[in-house]
Amino acid sequence: MPAPRIWIKNPLALFTGNDLDGRGGLVLHDGLISEVLAAGQQPAQPCEQVFDARDHVVLPGLINTHHHFYQTLTRAWAPVVNEPLFPWLKTLYPVWARLTPEKLALASKVALAELLLSGCTTAADHHYLFPDGLEQAIDVQVEVVRELGMRAMLTRGSMSLGEADGGLPPQQTVQQGEVILADSQRLVERYHQRGPGAQIQIALAPCSPFSVTPQIMRASAAMAEQLDVRLHTHLAETLDEEDFCLQRFGLRTVDYLDSVGWLGPRTWLAHGIHFNPDEIARLGAAGTGICHCPTSNMRLASGICPTEDLLAAGAPVGLGVDGSASNDASNMILEARQALYLQRLRYGAKAVTPEKVLGWATRGSARLLGRDDIGELAVGKQADLALFKLDELRFSGSHDPLSALLLCGADKADRVMVGGQWRVVDGQVEGLDVQGLIAEHRQAARALVTPL
């Protein structure tokens, strides 16, 4: 049977991420947007399905460009609630080293379901923990992504510099370089999809300057070039990290990035807080992207990403929720709200608007992942949509629907579509037993933090 044409008709408000009108709604066909209608305009052909969106604000599906799904198991854990990054990590590493495939699957399903309910349709995860028994971690995540029908950029992280050699992670969490590279190539060859509409993509993602060797950074950059995939890492998140790079390598963070062959358009960085003006200019000239993670940066007191300076220099900027042990949620629409408020502290109210921040969460994030088929509403783009209602008490008295999403604190989408298929209907994930998932996940979380 031919795919039906769907008219998302006359939305309350619509953010296209570009200059198109869109007030008449969208026509969707075969998983793509086939028409963007101006106010009063009718579809060019009859539509078999019509969804009246008069009560909905319609956005492109939100795109999360940095996460650690496994961390949903260690949210709000008392021993690290008040710690900055380095002691936070040192305390949590031994706990995370006890991850199993079953626990990772539960953690990933919780993270993805929570993201989906917040209007997110594409998520990048940075998984860098491969203790004994968890060598197939990315394969586990692939199955969960497929089950929930989302899109994902799964980054094959790594840690190769343990405590014994001057790094931060304990030895049971690090791997040898040849193991890391062999598995990275295997994952790209097995799972990485190319072109418009890709569901699963793979990137290479050595964890951070304080947990991997320069050798694995250089080898990963060479492999990414050879296999034509993207590169991702944490960089310039804290002043402690900057001090580590100066003491160990004799270089500031961007100099170190350049020295290992990572300063280029293939790379996107998580956090990107502590850059000086020269480094911002170099990142912009190289086209290296930055994922702003405002909630995590506030939670760990790391600092404020210089988004406007990076954008002015030419560096793409997107948003990420970061791990669920430093956020401690997986909610993209709330992350956009945090970005709005945190960036206004740095740049002022007029410079940072709701529309600009929604652009970071959609088209900007798509650029970080090297995609031009998602992140905006235009003819030929993927039919990835997030629809929000403004019928709760918190929205009563609001006047501008688009601004109300962020200013009044929307936290849950009413409907979400991925590739023309509804994945969230009436605020519920299609086919998912949420209460059963919560019960299993809570049990796994308790077991993970309980000493053996």
Image (spheres, grey):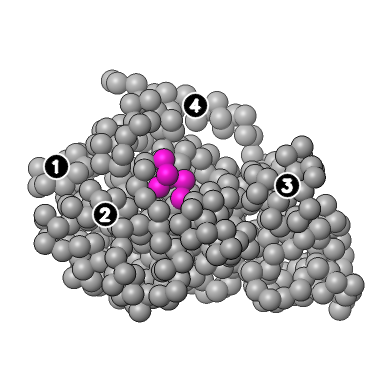
Instruction: Kindly identify the amino acid type of the residue bearing the numbered disc 1.
Output: Glu
The disc placed on residue 163 is: 1
On whether residue 296 falls in the magenta region, the answer is yes
Please give the residue where the numbered disc 2 appears in the rendered image: 208
Q: Secondary structure at mark 2?
A: loop
Observer able to see residue 228: no
Find the magenta span and give its range: 294-299
- The one of 146 and 264 positioned closer to us in this rendering: 264
Instruction: Kindly identify the amino acid type of the residue bearing the numbered disc 2.
Output: Ser
Please give the residue where the numbered disc 3 appears in the rendered image: 414
Query: Based on the displayed image, in which of its 4 quarters is residue 264 positioned?
Result: bottom left
On whether residue 129 falls in the magenta region, the answer is no
Q: Secondary structure at mark 4?
A: helix
> Which one is in front in this view, the residue at disc 3 or the one at disc 4?
3
Main SS of residues in magenta: helix
Q: Secondary structure at mark 1?
A: helix
| Sequence-earlier tag: 2 or 4 | 2
Q: Residue at x 33, y 75 (%)?
A: 281
Please give the residue where the numbered disc 4 appears in the rendered image: 442
Q: CA distance from mark 2 to mark 3?
A: 37 Å
